[in-house]
Image (cartoon, rainbow, N blue to C red):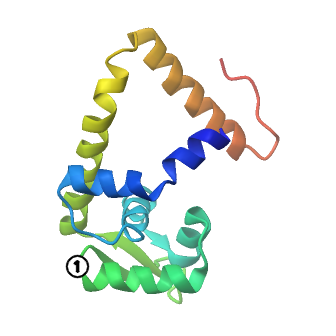
């Protein structure tokens, strides 16, 4: 797991993904944009927790995404003091391009795998994440 995280956190991987997607965006911003698209509407505190970054840094970066027209901030219906980030159509076009680029990059690797191996990977990764998120320590869901 450490090897996977270290590999995925290499700056050159982010640059390669952005280049494959044909996107010009600061590589510190795109994981936040993807997080907003996947988990939004989302407040800055939750986004900073998910990204493992300082709240003040994420707040500045979210403001930059807003200035680029990639997200909007609006008051939370549950608590008007909290402003949630929501992806815009322009932002979604960018995350769609990133998703397509990820698929193009992964396709040659996964083409060597059997359908069963790929299905097992998806199933076991889902189980691993679900068990990590389960406060009771996880249970066997197979």
- Measured along the vertical axis of the image, is residue 79 above or below residue 109? below
* Vertical side of 61 occupied by 15: above or below: above
User: Residue at the spot x=58%, y=48% of the render?
Assistant: 6
Where 112 falls versus 33 (above or below)?
above
> What is the quadrant of residue 2 in the picture?
top right
Frontmost residue, 10 versus 85: 10
Could you say where residue 132 lies in the image, as x and y percent from the top left? 71, 42
- Residue lying at the far bottom of the rendered structure: 81
Foreground: 78 or 92?
92
Q: Determine the residue located farthest toward the right in the rendered image.
A: 136
Q: Position of residue 11 (x, y in %)?
A: 44, 59
Q: Position of residue 103 (x, y in %)?
A: 29, 36
Local crowd at mark 1 within 10 Å, few (<14), some, or many (≥20)? some
Q: Residue at x 50, y 48 (%)?
A: 8
Q: Quadrant of the N terminus?
A: top right
Q: Label 1 belongs to which residue? A: 69
Q: How many marks?
A: 1
Q: Is residue 110 above or below residue 79?
A: above
Q: Position of residue 117 (x, y in %)?
A: 47, 13
Q: Is residue 107 left or right of residue 78?
A: left
Kindly identify the residue that appears in the image at 27 percent across and 86 percent down. Answer: 67
């Amino acid at each position: 797991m450490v090897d996977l995280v270290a590999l995925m956190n290499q700056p050159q991987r982010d640059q390669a993904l952005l280049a494959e997607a044909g996107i010009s965006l600061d590589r510190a911003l795109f994981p936040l944009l993807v997080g907003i698209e996947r988990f939004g509407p989302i407040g800055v505190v939750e986004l900073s927790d998910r990204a493992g970054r300082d709240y003040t840094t994420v707040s500045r970066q979210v403001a930059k995404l807003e200035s680029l027209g990639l997200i909007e901030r609006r008051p939370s219906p549950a608590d008007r003091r909290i402003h949630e980030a929501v992806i815009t159509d322009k932002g979604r076009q960018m995350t769609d391009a990133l998703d397509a680029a990820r698929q193009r990059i992964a396709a040659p690797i996964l083409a060597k795998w059997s359908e069963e191996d790929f299905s097992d990977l998806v199933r076991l990764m889902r189980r691993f994440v679900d068990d990590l998120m389960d406060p009771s320590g996880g249970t066997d869901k197979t």
